[in-house]
Image (cartoon, rainbow, N blue to C red):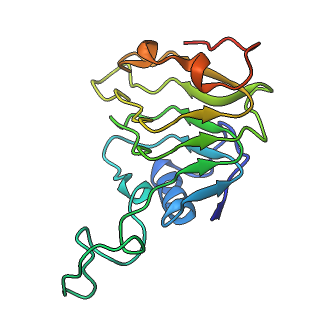
Amino acid sequence: VCAGTLNGLSVTGDAQRQYQTLHKMYNNCEIVMGNLEIVLIDHAQDLSFLQVRGPRGPRGDVGGRARPLTPAAAPQTIREVTGYILIAMNVFASLPLQNLRVIRGTQFYEEKYALFVLLNYNPNSTHALRHLGLNQLTEILAGGVYIEKNAQLCHVDTVEWRDIMRDPRLEPVV
């Protein structure tokens, strides 16, 4: 369990400092208590820390000795966010949140969104968010979805967002 943030689009320092802060906060995290805000991350940054948990290697090895994977040794990922998710002004290609299952929406971005994805491309280069990777997301318990101005983002219009969002009165903005 780790604490989330409430910074919105505000960042402290440059892109490298923003990445270091993100790494420190969410490394080894399965449940984000609050908001997951990923803002101003460069294409060269490695976001795999959002996936892997613990000191074990990819095959369960500790200190160079291989061990079989047990449930406790298997790599874990962020699987729940209690607040909202903000993905904005980034230029990495893929978001490694494949095991995220639920966004609770106890807090909203822009007063009504539990998932907000905006401006994830660089108009002066080919670097951009191309894949959200939210393969296991099955529930947004409160709040809506806003995914706009992501020039190279694929497949978001093929997702049945209304089936994931619990509030039938909300229309996803995609």
> What percent of the width, then of the height, locates residue 125?
29, 24
Of residue 160 and residue 122, the one placed in the foreground of this image is 160
Q: Residue at 46%, 18% (x, y): give it.
A: 159
Q: Residue at 74%, 21% (x, y): give it.
A: 167
Residue 70 lies, with reference to residue 99, above or below; the image says: below
Residue 45 lies, with reference to residue 172, above or below; the image says: below
Residue 83 lies, with reference to residue 62, above or below; the image says: above
For residue 102, what is the image quadrant? Answer: top right
> What percent of the width, then of the height, locates residue 67?
23, 82
Q: Residue at 53%, 43% (x, y): give it.
A: 101
Q: Residue at 41%, 14% (x, y): give it.
A: 158
> What percent of the width, then of the height, locates residue 43?
33, 40
For residue 128, what is the image quadrant? Answer: top left
> What percent of the width, then of the height, locates residue 113?
70, 26
Of residue 13 and residue 79, the one placed in the foreground of this image is 79
User: In this rendering, would 164 be left or right of 112?
Assistant: left
For residue 174, what is the image quadrant? Answer: top right
